[in-house]
Amino acid sequence: MVVRPQSLELRDDEGAVVAALDYMSAPADAIAVLTDLFDVPPVDESYRGTNHTPPGVFHSWDEFVLDERFYDEERRDGGAFDYVWPRFAVYFDGPSARGFDLVSEQGIHAADAWSTLSGDPVFDANLWTCVGTPIETVDFARPDGQPETATVVATPTDDGSVVKWLGAPVMIADGCA
């Protein structure tokens, strides 16, 4: 499994993409594909929304988490929020889940040394997100024509020595509340 800025890619042993789960697609469809792939249903944990995030459900298979988010669909459609309000996001909390490699396009895993990641040319600590450091970006135009940048981010452990988790999509931001 490869985390990308706009989708989760499922690849075969040779690296060819066999399926891409777009973060704007129906979470139920992605959950069905992943349940079939992992051969077990996820462990589900509901969470409450805050003034910055909607309520949702974490669907977990070992170290892989699909974060289903319950944004207001009418506001999404009317506000051209697209990837700013993804229907789901993914997090890799470890290097593998149920025998499947969890990796970035560059080959980075959660639990890798942070120094390895920070030396990679794609690492850009100057790009601002509300969480994590971007390690892959993709620029696109929202439905209203405004430019947007989606990223895959990595976060370090508290001591800064190891990649704690990888996640996507996370948007480039001017600031966070």
Image (cartoon, rainbow, N blue to C red):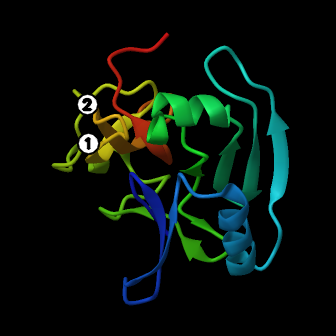
Q: Residue at x 50, y 35 (%)?
A: 157
What is the crowding at mark 1: few (fewer than 14 residues within 10 Å), some, or many (at least 20)?
some
Q: Which mark is residue 11?
A: none
Q: Is residue 139 left or right of residue 164?
A: left
Residue 79 lies, with reference to residue 7, above or below; the image says above
Q: Residue at x 74, y 56 (%)?
A: 60
User: Are the residues flagged by discs 1 and 2 in contact, CB closer than 8 Å?
Assistant: yes
What is the crowding at mark 2: few (fewer than 14 residues within 10 Å), some, or many (at least 20)?
few
Q: Amino acid at mark 1?
A: Ser
Q: Residue at x 37, y 58 (%)?
A: 108
Q: Please report whichever mark, 1 or 2, sits nearer to the chain's N-terminal start.
A: 1
Residue 131 lies, with reference to residue 52, above or below; the image says below
Q: Position of residue 103 (x, y in %)?
A: 44, 63
Q: Nearer the viewer, residue 120 or 34?
A: 34
Disc 2 marks which residue? 125
Disc 1 marks which residue? 118
